[in-house]
Amino acid sequence: MKAKLLLPNADTIAAIATAQGRGGIGVVRVSGRHCEILARGILGKLPVARLATCGNFLDENGDTLDQGVALFFPAPHSYTGEDVLELQGHGGPAVLQLVLQRCLNLGARLAQPGEFTRRAFLNDKLDLAQAEGVADLIDANSAEAARSAMRSLRGEFSAAIHGMVDELINLRMLVEAMLDFPEEEVDAVDMERRDALLTSVRSCLQHTLDTAKQGSLLREGAYVVIAGQPNVGKSSLLNRLAGEEVALVSDTPGTTRDVIRQAIQIRGVPLHIVDTAGLRESEDAVESMGIARAHQTIHRADLILLLLDASKGLTAQDEAILAGLPADISRLLVFNKSDLLDDSAALSADAPFASVPSIRVSAKTGAGLEALRGKLLEAVGWRDQESGAFMARERHVRALALAQTHLAQAQAVLASAELFAEELRLAQRALNEIAGEFTPDDLLGEIFSRFCIGK
C-alpha cells in the first residue's frame, strides 16, 4: 500500500541535478527538513520563498565557493512536497562538487537515484505513472516519445486509469447492493445499469490498452529481424534503412556470419533492425554458428522481415524458410532487387502464404524504401493517433491486460453475483497498481533505482 507523508522525519538529501560534464549552469538540489539550516550555512540567510536570490555560496570559513542564484520552495508547495533548496551556479564539475560537499558537511546526505521523485510520489505530489513519466521524458530519444512522456507526466494516463476505477467502483457498489438483498427481486433497471456500466468500462479499457501499447512501442521500440537466403540483399537493405554502411556487402554467399544490430527511427518510432546470416545448409563451422544465432534471434523478434530475390520469386527454399518461422510472430515478405524486373511484373506469395503481406523494393536504388518504412510501422502495430499516445511501460500493459482478463471473466459469470463481484475487485486492483495504490516496496525500489541521481 502506498505510504503517506514523509515530511516530519525524512532525511535531508542533496545531489547535483544537472548532467555530468561542463555546462553554463549547474544545479545542486536539496530536499528535506534541514533546508533552512543549509541555506543559512551556504548563503548566510534564508532566501525569500519562490523568489530567485542572487548571492555567494560560502564555505565553512565564509570564503566564496561560487556565485549564483538560490531558490527556496517551502513545504508542501515544492516538487517533493518537502522544503526544497536549489543552488544554481556555474556548471563546472569541480565547483559543483565543492557546493555539494558543503551541503553534505552541513548535514545532508547524498541522494539515491530517483529519490527526489520517489519522495514526490510518497508525498502525493504525483502518482506512480506520472513519476515514471518524469524518467521517460528525460530518456526520450525522439520528439514523439517526448510528447508522449509529457502527456503521462501531465496526468492523461492517470486520468484514464482513475476514470475506469471510478466506473468500477460504481459498478461494484451496485453489485454489492444486489448481494445485500438476496431475498428481494432485483429490479430490471438495475440489471440494465449493471450491463451498461460493464460494457462502458470494458470499452474504455480496450481503448486505453490500445493507446498504452502505442506508448510502450515508443518507449521500448520493436525488434525487426531481416532473414532470408544468402545473397538476397539483407545487409544492403540494413545499410539503406540505417542510412550508413553498418554491414559488409559482398557477392560472396555467407559474408554475414554474425548478428548485426542497428537502431533507427521511423516517424519518431524506434526500431531495432537486426541483420542475420543467410539461412541455408552449410558445412562451414563458423557460418553454421552464424545460422544458429540467426534462428535464435528470429524467435525473439517482434517482426520478421523475410527478404527474397524478386528476380527468382518465391522459391522452394523460401517457402521452407517461411514455413519454419514461428507462427506467433508477424512477418513481412520483401521482394528485393526489383530493379531487375519489368515494372509490370507481378509478385505475390502462393498459397498457403497468400495472406502474408508483401512489398517490392530495391536496396540498390532505394526504390520502394519509403513504402517499406510505412509497412514496417504498420506491421509492428503503430498507428498515427490524433490525440496522441501517452508513454507506457511493460508493467502498465500487463496490468491493463490483466484487468481486461478479469472483466472478460466477470462477463462470463454474470449469473453468479459473488463471482462477478470478485472479478470486478481483481480488475480494480490491477488498475490501481498502475498509479501506485497497491505497489510493493520492492517494485518501487526497482522503478526509482532506474532514475538519474538528482531527479
Image (spheres, grey):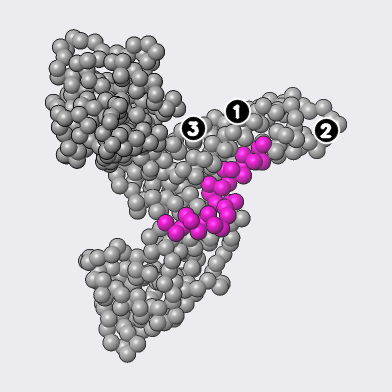
- Horizontal side of 409 relative to 307 (left or right) equals right
| Residue matched to label 2 | 182
Mark 2 residue type:
Pro
| Distance between the alpha carbons at the discs numbered 2 and 1 | 24 Å
Q: Nearer the viewer, residue 223 or 412?
A: 223
Image x and y of residue 363, in percent: 18, 27
Does the magenta-highlighted stretch encompass residue 7?
A: no
Q: Which residues are magenta?
A: 423-450
**Callout 1 amino acid:** Thr
Q: Dot 3, crowdedness within 10 Å: few (<14), some or many (≥20)?
A: few
Residue type at mark 3: give it.
His
Residue 276 visible here: no
The reply to whether dot 3 and dot 2 touch (C-beta < 8 Å) is: no
Name the residue tied to disc 3.
207
Reading the image, the residue beneath label 1 is: 199
Up-down relation of residue 205 to residue 43 (above or below)? above
